[in-house]
Image: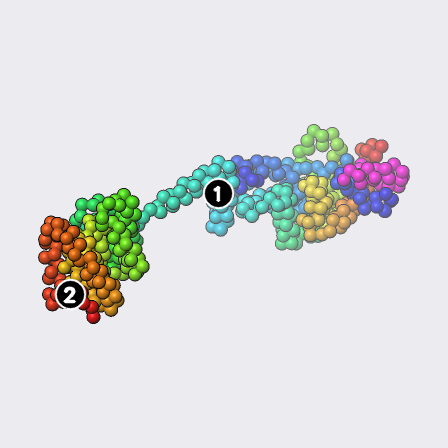
Amino acid sequence: MDCEKYDKIALDLLYDELDELTAAAAKRHLDQCARCREIHLKLRATREVGVLPLADVPPGFTERVLAAERLVSRKLPLPQRAARALTILAGYAMRPQLAMAALLLLMIGSSLVFLRARPGERSTVMVTERGMPETDTDSVILPSAKKAEQVTVAPAPAPTVVANQEGSSQGLGDKQGVAAEPATKSARAKSAVAANEYEARREAPASPAGGMAAPAADMAARDDALGMGSAEEKSPADAALQRAKDLQQSSGCSAAAPKFEEVSTRYPGTGAANEALWRAAECRRLLGDLGAARQAYTLLLDVSSYHDRAAAALKQLGKDAPSAELAASKPAASEPRSAAAAAPAAPPAKAKSGASGSSR
Amino acid sequence: MLRYQRGDKDAFAVLVRRYQVRVYNFVLRHLRSEASAEEIAQEVFLRIVQRASAFKHEARFSTWLYTIARNLCVDHLRKANLRRHPSLDQPVGSDADAPSLGEQVADPAPTVERRAASSQVAFSILQAVDELSEDQREVFLLREIAHLPFKEIAELTNTSENTVKSRMRYALEHLQLKLSEFEEYARALR
């Protein structure tokens, strides 16, 4: 360090504002330089002796200041009072206990938000009881005060229940309890088809000797091939046909044949009626009621899509007629009403021509 | 100050008692008027009350305090047109027997240490300080009474640090000249 540099840092050295290295260098320079040492000694002596005497504050100064402080604090403008309140609150907010309490409240609040996410009051619950539905108007909607439930009840004894929850409020005002919406019907039919498939899968290996199970499975397979398995958007005729099929699955041809014949007569000219007539014929054939079967096949000769099958069936029926009539004489006696029930469905004239086995 | 900002009323009394003597002396030596000094010193503390929420602790409290005091002094001098330096030997008022300004400003009740020192030395110190220019006196008071470092004095007075040191050195050399005739100063040199 030289004298010029010392002059720059003389006051810093005097007031101890130098870092240690620079201070040590300055002191080494002072040891070597008489001029700078003399300057430093004079400055240090001036500082030691020239201490500025301090006067005491006037008597009562502190009290007057504190009194003025109270007065000023009360008269602070609103922005400054707000800023001061904010500062005080911020001071409290920075304390760890309050931070933990705030965190706890936040957790409780957020959990309450999640707990409130339960089903709405207007949501509906649809319950479908599967079994042997008899009519289309057997669905009942039971609205309640807080939760509306759409209940579709079938009079059949089978208690299996499929429940669907829907957000829709359709049909809530229907106090008569009639489910007329297509959506409800299609959903019910869909669930019925699903149940039928389940029943068919369950019964098929369990009852090989049932006699009716194998033909029923064949018919179900054909339904799938023809696209009849889909229960969505079915007409009343299709629905009635589906119920007859369900009855065939569950109770066999003896119970289903009259139903098929009923469908064919109630909805004439529809695809469902033709299919029902075909199934009625098949059922009658299986039951040994060849006359009724022949009548039905003969009627189907007029339907182009069934013509070939009906002709083939009639042909086959002609071959099997002697042995089959012998075999069917006993069960036919046990079910005289089946043949009688089928009779009105078939016009006598065509039945006669069908019985002769002729084809168009 | 943090306690006071958080609403502790007693903290302000602590601040007042801690800083009142130095603030009062800073203002007194700056204005050279006891009446004005008391008024301005009180105003300094009231400004602290009014602006407490604005203090962000980015600087030392003492720096903020003396900045307020210095600004109030400057404003007061400007208003009172007291920039001309009256002599400390000149009697106050029209009465020729009245005490001089230097006698008024000098410590009226010296402590034990100061009592040991020569009153003549104290008077010379005060006289030397009074003879300084306003800028030099301001730096000297901020350094010797407020004990602010040169860097903060430079920021407070809006000047460079070298300028502050230059003013301070001139003030010390002037004081040195005034004290050179006293035996205490000679002893300190040894």
Residue A148 visible at all: no
Label 2 element class:
loop
Between the C-alphas of marks 1 and 2, the distance is: 106 Å
State the extent of the magenta-drawn residues as a range. A19-47
Going by the image, does A29 lie left or right of B99?
Answer: right
In the image, A306 versus A97, the foreground residue is A306
Q: Point out the image quarter for the N terminus of chain A.
A: top right
Residue occupying the point 65% across, 51% down: B74
* Chain containing mark 2: A
Residue B25 visible at all: yes
Which mark identifies residue A356?
2
Which mark identifies residue A89?
1
Question: Is A108 drawn above or below residue B133 in the view shown?
Answer: above
Label 1 element class:
helix
- Residue B127 position within the rendered picture, expressed as x and y whole percent measured from the top left: 75, 43
In the image, B75 versus A190, the foreground residue is A190
Residue occupying the point 83% across, 44% down: A6
In the image, A221 versus A69, the foreground residue is A221
